[in-house]
């Protein structure tokens, strides 16, 4: 077992509370086939406006499926998602902070997840503003509709027509901040640090930071340990070492 993996295992054994921080890297690798192209389309068109969705509901659904939902419902959770579930089950991590909206941590079985950009599990009707909280409504092959009035629904974190979206995102980020503030160890996996200044600023001065990423990121300087390897390989080695111990 590599010295870096042993050091990570040592940090985890010494930690009273370990949190995993994940980003798009663990989803790019395992099913978000055209995410970058789709995000480019999202940025170039007002696809999140109430008027657009009202006039083009199935096109909106197609864009969401291509950008996010194919990974969730067809490819499913990656090895890393499943490993994090097992680490939570063993009590080796107490939660996950993620920038991902794809619900893959929840689909995999993780119980304590802070999705600070929102998710497809929190939706709102573009007409009556009724809320629904089930990501499975997006897996029906067509645009989901409000049970009360029949209008299209959309992820609440995309909804810009009122202050509801801002309240949802503030709550989500606060959960991420609270989890980081409790941690003795943060294991950062597959993220370059999008909005990390908002939650990592609350980490304890004596808490340790480990980054698992083949590439350099903004976390390099802050990390006590940088592991330049595939996260699935690293976590597999750590879990196997724990079982042997």
Image (tube, rainbow, N blue to C red):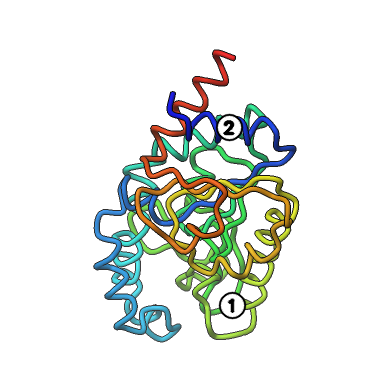
Q: Is residue 238 above or below residue 95?
A: above
Picture coordinates of residue 22, whole percent (x, y): 50, 52
The quadrant of the rendering that contains the N terminus is top left
Which residue lies at the image location 64% right of the left edge and 27% below the top edge? 90
Tell me the SS state at disc 1: loop
Judged left or right of residue 130, residue 237 is: left
141 left or right of 173? left
Q: Which of the 4 quarters of the picture holds residue 242?
A: top right
Residue sitting nearer the eye, 214 or 38: 214
Residue drawn at (30%, 67%) of the image: 63
Mark 1 neighbour density, 10 Å: few (under 14) some (14–19) many (20 or more): few
Tag on residue 214? none
Q: What residue appears at the point 43 percent right and 83 percent down from the top-left corner?
A: 49
Location of mark 1 (residue): 128
Look at discs 2 and 1 and give the one toward the viewer.
2
Between 109 and 50, the one lying in front of the other is 109
Q: Which residue is mark 2?
A: 87
Position of residue 81 in the picture relative to residue 165 (left or right): left
Q: Quadrant of residue 144?
A: bottom left
Q: Residue at x 48, y 69 (%)?
A: 153
Dot 2 or dot 1, earlier in sequence: 2
Element type at mark 2: helix
> Image height check: is 134 above or below 152?
above
Q: Quadrant of the C terminus?
A: top right
Expressed as whole percent of the image width and height from the top left, the position of residue 106 reads 54, 45
Q: Position of residue 26 (x, y in %)?
A: 40, 48
Which residue is situated farthest in the top direction here?
244
Tell me where residue 168 appears, x and y as whole percent: 64, 70
């Amino acid at each position: 077992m590599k010295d870096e993996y042993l050091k990570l295992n040592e940090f985890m054994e010494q930690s009273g509370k370990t949190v995993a921080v994940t980003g798009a890297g663990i989803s790019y690798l395992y099913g978000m086939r055209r995410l970058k192209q789709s995000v480019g389309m999202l940025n170039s068109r007002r696809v999140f406006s109430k008027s657009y969705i009202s006039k083009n509901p199935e096109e909106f659904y197609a864009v969401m499926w291509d950008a996010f939902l194919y990974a969730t419902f067809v490819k499913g959770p990656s090895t890393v998602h499943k490993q994090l579930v097992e680490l939570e089950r063993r009590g080796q991590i107490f939660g996950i902070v993620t920038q991902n909206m794809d619900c893959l941590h929840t689909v995999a079985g993780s119980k304590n997840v802070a999705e600070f950009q929102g998710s497809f599990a929190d939706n709102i009707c573009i007409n009556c503003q009724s809320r629904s909280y089930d990501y499975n409504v997006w897996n029906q092959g067509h645009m989901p509709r409000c049970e009360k009035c029949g209008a299209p629904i959309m992820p609440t974190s995309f909804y810009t027509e009122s202050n509801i979206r801002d309240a949802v995102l503030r709550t989500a980020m606060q959960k991420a901040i609270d989890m980081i503030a409790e941690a003795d160890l943060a294991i950062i996996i597959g993220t370059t640090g999008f909005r990390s200044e908002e939650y990592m600023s609350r980490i304890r001065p004596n808490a340790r930071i480990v980054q698992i990423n083949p590439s350099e990121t903004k976390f390099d300087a802050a990390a006590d340990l940088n592991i330049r390897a595939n996260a699935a390989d690293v976590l597999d080695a750590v879990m196997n070492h724990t079982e042997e111990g």
